[in-house]
Image (cartoon, helix red, strand yellow):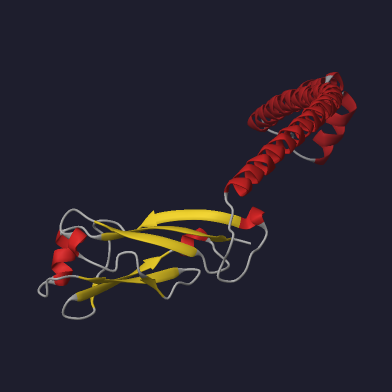
Amino acid sequence: MRIILMLVTTLMFTVATGDEEEEAVLLNRAKPPSHDTVEDLKDMLVVTMQNIVSNNDLVTQLTQKDVQNMLSVGQCKVEMEDMKKSYSEEIAKLKEQIESMKEELRSQIGTVDAELKGQIEDMGAGHNTTLAALSGEIREEISQISSEVTIVSAEQGIRDRKCAKVCAGTTGRTSTTWVNYSTTGIRTTTDISGCGFVTVPTVTTSLEGASSHWTNSGGSEIYSVTTTQFVTYINTPSSSGLRSKASEYKWNMEWIAVGYTC
């Protein structure tokens, strides 16, 4: 900048004062420039100097900004490196904590698993003992029942006394289905399939009701006995409205069956 100012100053001094030898030559060769022309050149030189100074200031400002930007970028890089390092350390710590928690959970699971196995084994032993005791009690009860139920004769022969069973029931006062058989007779079929007999049982029956059934006959005479049912025919002195009368008087069959279930 100082060099440029010196050159311009020298040039202006030369134009203003001139070199005597150069002036002699110029005077000999041509007409000297007018005063206005010299002033114009001076103005141009001043404007040029101002532009140069202004551009130089601009370049300086731009340079300063570039330096600031470079410093800012460098600072950002440093901060980013610090952040990466910090994050890496935090991640490493988290991984260590997670591994520690996993180990602790494995240890706890192993302890709980061992405790559960021990409890299950104890429960199993206790259940086995309880089942054995119950099984013994059931066998004893079955033995007592079997000794109380004795079948001396049966339709299909004698079987193991442990399989003997007594079963009883009723057709129901309001649920018995009566069917007209003749002008003075009605019949009903009794279901005994719930007893589970495997051979034809011995069945004893009686006609139960609320009225007039004492005049009937056939309440203890049964027909077509199987392992699942039997049929009863009732004869009555009356010959009108037998089915409605039987329902009205709540006639029903009560029975006891003894047979084998195995």
Query: Does residue 174 appear in the picture of this structure?
Result: yes
Viewer-closest of 112 and 32: 112
Q: Is residue 149 left or right of residue 104?
A: left
When the figure is inspected, residue 238 is found, relative to residue 93, above or below; the finding is: below
How far across and how far down the image is residue 79, in percent?
A: 80, 22
How far across and how far down the image is residue 109, in percent?
A: 81, 28
When the figure is inspected, residue 232 is found, relative to residue 136, above or below; the finding is: below
Residue drawn at x 48%, y 72% as measured from the top left: 226
In terms of image quadrants, where is residue 120? top right
How far across and how far down the image is residue 29, in percent?
A: 82, 40
Viewer-closest of 44 and 86: 86
Question: Which residue extends farthest left?
Answer: 240
Residue drawn at x 11%, y 75% as measured from the top left: 239
Residue drawn at x 90%, y 28% as measured from the top left: 21
How far across and how far down the image is residue 50, in percent?
A: 69, 25
Viewer-closest of 182 and 151: 151
Q: Is residue 199 left or right of residue 214?
A: right
